[in-house]
Image (spheres, rainbow, N blue to C red):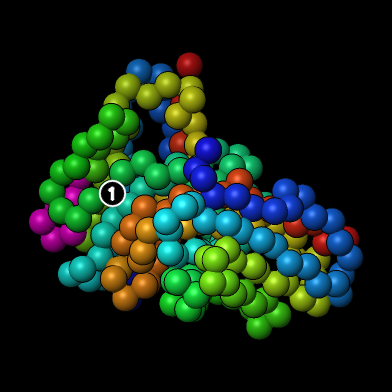
């Protein structure tokens, strides 16, 4: 158990809809990272937050947005969903920045029908 | 910006030592190299991290040459349970994260 929690575990929705994925980092970790992993693909880094502020952006679509709240939990919002957005979405946390060990949550499996 | 390249797949046998190399030609002075292991449908798990020379922990060793343009993850005496995907990551203090595409390691009996 990494100490990172993600909800929900599974999500099934339809094209065009909007969903919110939630992540609670390990106690004491200030950075949160979001990743997308499509079936049998590698990890695609989406975005990183540090203590409430956006720090780095990867291949995140404009339809996707995220935020980190004062209690350090984070949410990833996915809108106007398409079939190709079906994937595992992982959240990770680390103590501070990008040179620190990342601890990954169990992931949210999103299925868009 | 560093780009990481690693083999797509590797096979080995139980009890052998396995070495997986990651190339990161444009690594910057302050960048660190980290390796993660991922099993199907699970989040990646930290294996080892290094900056230069050699680092060893209870599960693996990491060799980084002086020019730091590559790194080699060494898994001693692998078992079937080491079958997984292994990722190298170059992370920097300016918040850049460059992940390799992953190496699928298959261990045979």
Q: Is residue B81 above or below residue A65?
A: above
Q: Nearer the viewer, residue A36 or B3?
A: A36
Is residue B96 covered in magenta? no
Left or right of residue B100, residue A110 in this image = right
Q: Nearer the viewer, residue A25 or A92?
A: A25
Region in magenta = B63-68
Residue drawn 31% across the image and 44% down it: B48
- Residue A8 percent coordinates (x, y): 73, 53
Which quadrant is home to the C terminus of chain A?
Answer: bottom right
Residue drawn 86% across the image and 61% down it: A13
Residue B5 visible, this orientation: no
What is the magenta segment's predominant secondary structure?
A: loop
Q: Nearer the viewer, residue B44 or B72?
A: B44
Q: Is residue A98 above or below residue B45?
A: below
Left or right of residue B85, residue B62 in this image = left
Disc 1 target residue:
B49
Left or right of residue B87, residue A59 in this image = right
Q: Secondary structure at mark 1?
A: strand
Tell me which chain the residue with mark 1 is part of. Answer: B
* Count of numbered badges drawn on the protein: 1
Residue B76 visible, this orientation: yes
Residue drawn 60% across the image and 50% down it: A5
Sort mark 1 into few (<14), some (14-19) or many (20+) by Cα contacts within 10 Å.
many
**Which quadrant of the figure has residue A20?**
bottom right
């Amino acid at each position: 158990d990494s100490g990172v929690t993600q909800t929900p575990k599974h999500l099934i929705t339809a094209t065009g809809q909007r969903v919110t994925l939630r992540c609670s980092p390990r106690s004491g970790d200030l950075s949160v990272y979001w990743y997308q992993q499509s079936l049998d693909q590698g990890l695609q880094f989406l975005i990183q937050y540090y203590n409430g502020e956006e720090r780095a952006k990867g291949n995140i679509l404009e339809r996707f947005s995220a935020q980190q709240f004062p209690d350090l939990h984070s949410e990833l919002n996915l809108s106007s969903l398409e079939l190709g957005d079906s994937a595992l979405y992982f959240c990770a946390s680390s103590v501070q920045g990008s040179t620190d060990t990342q601890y990954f949550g169990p992931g949210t499996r999103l299925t868009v029908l | 910006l560093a780009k990481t390249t690693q083999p797509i797949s590797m096979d080995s046998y139980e009890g052998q030592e396995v070495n997986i190399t990651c190339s990161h030609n444009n690594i910057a002075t302050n960048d660190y190299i980290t390796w993660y292991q991922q099993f199907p449908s699970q989040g990646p798990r930290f294996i080892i991290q290094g900056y230069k020379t050699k680092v060893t922990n209870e599960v693996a060793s990491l060799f980084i040459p002086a020019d730091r343009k590559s790194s080699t993850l060494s898994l001693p005496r692998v078992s079937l349970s080491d079958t997984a995907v292994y990722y190298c990551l170059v992370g920097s203090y300016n918040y850049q994260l460059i992940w390799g595409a992953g190496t699928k390691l298959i261990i045979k009996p």
